[in-house]
Amino acid sequence: MAQSPSQKNIVVLGGSYGGVSTAHYLLKHAFPQLPDKESYQVIVVSASSEAICRPACPRALISDDLLDQKKLFVNVAKQFEQYPKGSFRFVHGTATKLDHTERVVSVQPKKGTVEEIPFCALVIATGASTPSPLLSLNGDEEFLRSSWAEFRTSLPIAKSIVIAGGGPAGVETAGELGEYLNGRAGWFSSKLANPKVSITVVTSDSKILPALRPAIAKKAENLLAKVGVTVIKNSRVKSVTPEGAGTDRALVASKATVTLEDGTTLEADLYVAAFGTRPNTGFIDRSLLIADGRVETNASTLRVDKAGPRIYAIGDVGSYARPAVHLIPEAIPVLGANIKRDLLLAAGKEESAIGEDRKFEEDKRETQMVPIGKSKGVGAAMGYALPSFLVWAIKGRDYWLWTTGNLWSGKQWAKES
């Protein structure tokens, strides 16, 4: 697309929580204060034309009937029709190369040839991919939906399921599958007797949910037992046969033999790889990354200092905080304020007139909520353990769908906070 030499692009790579929120915040609160604001444009680049409430995947993968699909998926471009024409552009494509020296990002659109987009500011919000194609938007929305459809073909006939990973994704997936396939044990039973489907969670840790205290982890294990789920701890998956089972979309519904490090083998009609994530940073020069693949990000300002002026990172792709969805909304006002400040300085405003940087400080208190089936759950918030009914009320009812409408539409960012 031809661009005016005077056009100033603020490119946001990623169309999920961090990217969509940043774009709204800038359009609402930075653009109105910029001189010659008509010359600026926010360009959101996303591999998916739709955003999804990613935490809902453990329930959503079972059936479309369990969650409101109109809330689960939303069209990204439509969320920005409220802004003046020319101030926003959506590119359905994937970033293939970032030249942070020349300040150009190469994008491969879903259809068409590679486009090189120059930028005056860049926000990296590309997130992370999961080993399993069932648990996040590793591609576009069609890829995710087709992965779920493939998985569901084997679900009615499965007699054994193995889930690798004892973090929230693994525990939530086990709890959802357990209750859906097996039901729940009675009030006075410590575990479900003779479950229809054998479900096993394998974790390399000494307990499931390592971010939570042992007592909460034990409570989670007890709740899993009530829906027919067994936990194997201190054990790591060594290999899976056939190769690609559980991670390749074509093999997401295939039978598998799971071999543990101690030589134990588990036969699975379905295998779910629910461990770890991989930052989506393959297009970024390695000099800008830390050892685990995330972008080296200033923990206070959210700038990528090594990349040059007006380049930032937000969400799971950045190193400024641990990967956690609830930390992204806390970081958005800081990021938005610092981008606005940098743009005003670049436009010739005096530093004395626009104030200091805003500083982000990660809340490191124990905070994590993990539904286990439709009505139970465990968790903590700001260091305080939560009763099961509160976990259900806040997250377990619909896995945060009640919160995402305002975020996607930008209403959450109506006020400059």
Image: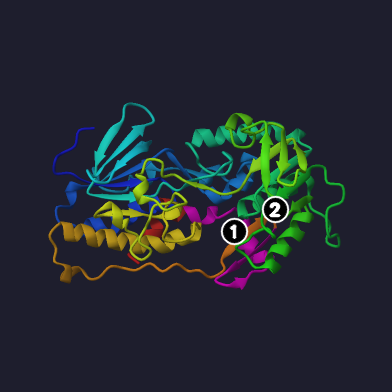
Asked if residue 245 can be seen in this view, the reply is: yes
323 or 93, which is in the foreground? 323
The magenta stretch is 376-404
Q: Quadrant of the C terminus?
A: bottom left
Residue beneath the point at 48% across and 47% down = 128
Using a 10 Å C-alpha cutoff, classify the residue at mark 1 as few (fewer than 14 neighbours), some (14 to 19) or many (20 or more): many
Say what amino acid the circle numbered 1 marks. Answer: Lys
Q: Secondary structure at mark 1?
A: helix
Kind of residue sitting beneath label 2: Gly
- Numbered tag placed on residue 373 in the rendering: 2
Pick the front one: 97 or 382: 97
Give SS at disc 2. Answer: loop
The mark nearer the N terminus, 1 or 2, is 2
Q: Position of residue 245 (x, y in %)?
A: 64, 34
Q: Is residue 394 magenta?
A: yes
Judging by the rendered image, the residue that carries numbered circle 1 is 395
